[in-house]
Image: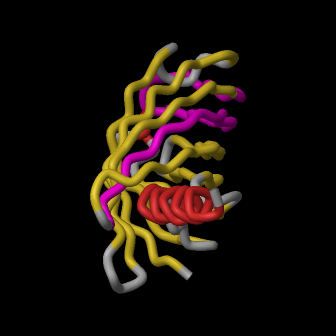
Amino acid sequence: MKKLVLTLSIFFSFIGMVKSQDISDHALGIRVGDNDGFGAEISYQRALKENTRLEVDLGFRDHDDSEAFKLTALHQWVWVIDNRFNWYAGFGAGVGSWSWDNDFLGNDDDDGFFLNVDGVVGVEYDFEIPLLISLDFRPEFNITGDYGDDTDFDIALSIRYQF
């Protein structure tokens, strides 16, 4: 009986090591995509547990006739595909504000606040150096406000330094 318990313990420990994912405590970088007109975002990831993390992205734009910002927070689960290649999925929300001042077209000024519900699914590669590169798909569903469309499908490439 002791041999069976020892054998099962070793087996399940091995399975746990194979399936577990090492998420770095912190990762900071840039996420580049369409992002409903915001383009690049500053991106930060923080490990929560062995296979979950929080991602916070800040997008902003400042042009001659418009100013806007968007802050997005996502809870993600990470799974191993093969060695250092992973996939992840999660959900979260985004909040933002915009101001549009168009003197060229007359009095066509607009501003407001918006709130999104977001999802995310993506793949990533964790290099042996402290670098993480990922490609993800993020659907965003507008809850309140009238910035952009009611639904946005954002595809982005990210690169982050892990520490």
Identify the coloring. Answer: secondary structure
* Left or right of 108, for residue 124: left
Q: Residue furthest front?
A: 1
Foreground of the two, 122 or 87: 87
Magenta segment's dominant SS is strand
For the image, the number of numbered tags is 0
* 163, above or below 93, in the image: below
- Residue at left offset 52%, top offset 62%: 7
Segment tinted magenta in the rendering: 84-113
* 127, above or below 47, in the image: below
Picture coordinates of residue 32, whole percent (x, y) = 36, 54
- Residue at left offset 68%, top offset 58%: 49
Q: Residue furthest bottom?
A: 129
Task: Examine the rendering and report whether any part of residue 14 can be seen.
Answer: yes
- Residue at left offset 55%, top offset 51%: 60
Verify whether residue 81 appears in magenta: no
The quarter of the picture where residue 91 lies is top right
* Left or right of 47, for residue 103: left
Verify whether residue 105 appears in magenta: yes
Foreground of the two, 118 or 86: 86
Q: Which of the image's four quarters has the N terminus? A: bottom right
Picture coordinates of residue 128, whole percent (x, y) = 33, 82
* 110, above or below 120, in the image: above
Picture coordinates of residue 126, whole percent (x, y) = 36, 69
The quarter of the picture where residue 72 lies is top right
- Residue at left offset 48%, top offset 59%: 11
Picture coordinates of residue 143, whole percent (x, y) = 66, 16
Q: Which of the image's four quarters has the C terminus? A: bottom right
